[in-house]
Amino acid sequence: MANDDDVLVVGAGHNALVCALKLAKAGRRVRVLEAKEVLGGATRTEKPFPKAPDLQQSTGAYLLGLMPPELMAELELEVPLLRRDPHYFLPTTGEGYLLFGSDRAETKRQFTSFFSAADWEADERLQAELAQLREDVGPTWLKAPLSIEETAERFVRPALRQVFVDLCRGSVGAYLERFGFESELVKAMYAVTDGFTGLAGGWDTPGTGMNFLVHNMCRLPGADGTWMVVKGGMGTVARQLVSRCEAAGVAFETNAPVASIDVEEGVARGVTLADGRSLRAEVVAVGADPFQLEGLLGDALPGALAARMGEWRRDGTTLKLNFCLESLPEFTCLPEDRGQHRGTIHILPQEQPLAALDAAWEAVQAGKLAEEPTIEWYIHTTLDPSIGDARGRHSAALFVQWVPYAIEGSSWEAEEARYCEHLFEIVDRFAPGTSDRVVDTFPLTPPKLEAHFGLTRGHIHHVDNSFGFADRMPHRVGVPGVYACSAGCHPGGSVIGAAGYNAANAILEDGA
């Protein structure tokens, strides 16, 4: 029986769309099968607030920082980006704060006024080293992954090779301690936003350094290493990819969940859908996470890869509390508007921050909700009014790290409303009255992230970014004709697209 398609792509997240587009541009007949009604996976813009029905929000992924500019150029993606300047705001409950932006002289003044000259000098050293690592490591993201040690030898300048290996294999805490920061609050800020995001691990956990490196790989033009807001929300990225795919001849089916990958005599021959239909193709590229791929292959999954699946399997640890604000909050430490609402607002424990981080991580490991969690706060309508509504209300989100997937002795159904209220109470300590400005909420706990976006166990990166380079899910899964193209592959989770790009390259190299 002749095949109608050369390649079937399972799932329509951004990596799957990149894979489909690159293959279609190379002349392959490609069909994308998406289980849900919406294309784009967690890269979408929605209207999630019944009490503010016209207000839009990037409900899942919320910033673009890590997509390689070379990939965007090759695929002709013209994503409208808005630079956040300032990009970080670290408030305190007193008078001190840090407002990171392009004006480094002003940032120095804040460091030396509210923290110390040693902290400023440490930050300068940190930023200089990260810039060098970005330059060296950037080219590896659009290549087949090597081991961490081989990557160091082949791509990283000699003076930083051991630093790179130690960072990838070690903890974010050990890395940050090298620079001589005196303020625990500053160290906590960097650890939380780059080391802990989407990962099961704390200050001393090996692998949090790998996550830190991944999150500091922004090379977008004009970004200066800072992540950027996409005009129109993150759904703009998905819409651009879908449009390019359609122009290249890619066919799409939504509401088309795949039940299994059909393997005959050890070789992929297509898929069977949940509705009983069979589609034939010599190549099946899976954009769903590795654990869904495992389920689709069943007994055909090679034993060695099945064993690695057990090592990668982690629960998601992220709560995304999307909400609508009637008006902008006012911070005690910085009441006048100096752009602090435009960047990432870091809400961190004020007393002994590093001990508080340890206590929060210990609580979550025990299945409990931390009383002093770490919070990143975003208000994207301050930069992108196109997603706002006629009343001038603001779409915002609290990105909370960490929470348990399952709550010991209770449930998210029982605890969600109380915990969201507690999070707003924490925010009120820094910006009094914020909770009174909340019009509506759309919380996404790990189980809701799983249900809403199809992420196994609510894991936003599919596989912890503690696994890097060749330690991640391979594109060639060991069954001829079956390839993985999800965020579980190199270089990691986030809106990057490189996993889909590299999977397409592997398919083309194999002549499939």
Image (cartoon, helix red, strand yellow):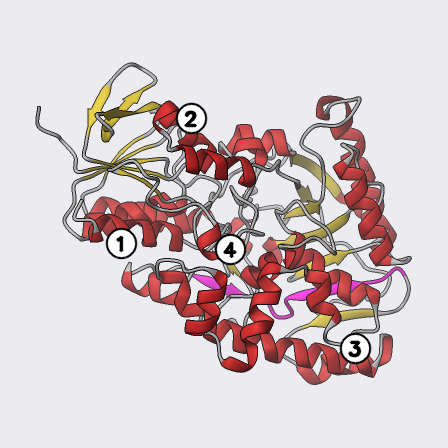
Q: What residue type is labelled 2?
A: Gly
Marks 3 and 4, how far apart in space?
29 Å
The residue singled out by tag 2 in the image is 295
Percent from the top left, x then y, of residue 203?
Answer: 74, 56
The residue singled out by tag 4 in the image is 468
Specify few, some or many for label 3: CA neighbours under 10 Å numbering under 14, 14-19, or 20 or more.
many
Q: What residue type is labelled 1?
A: Asn
Percent from the top left, x then y, of residue 424?
Answer: 80, 43
Specify few, some or many for label 1: CA neighbours under 10 Å numbering under 14, 14-19, or 20 or more.
some
From the viewer's perspective, tell me whether residue 365 is left or right of residue 492. Answer: right
Foreground mark, 2 or 3, reads 2
Marks 3 and 1, how far apart in space?
44 Å
Specify few, some or many for label 2: CA neighbours under 10 Å numbering under 14, 14-19, or 20 or more.
some
Residue span colored magenta:
80-93
From the viewer's perspective, tell me whether residue 71 is left or right of residue 47. Answer: left
Occupied quadrant, residue 159:
bottom right
Marks 4 and 1, how far apart in space?
19 Å
Name the secondary structure under disc 2.
Answer: helix
Name the secondary structure under disc 1.
Answer: helix
Image quarter (top left, top right, bottom left or bottom right) of the N terminus: top left
Q: Specify whether residue 91 is painted magenta.
A: yes
Q: Against 509, is 253 above or below?
A: above
Specify few, some or many for label 4: CA neighbours under 10 Å numbering under 14, 14-19, or 20 or more.
many
Foreground mark, 4 or 1, reads 4
Q: Which mark sits nearer the N-terminus, 3 or 1?
A: 3
The residue singled out by tag 3 in the image is 119
Name the secondary structure under disc 4.
Answer: loop
Percent from the top left, x then y, of residue 263?
Answer: 26, 26
Image quarter (top left, top right, bottom left or bottom right) of the C terminus: top left
The residue singled out by tag 1 in the image is 505
Q: What residue type is labelled 4?
A: Gly
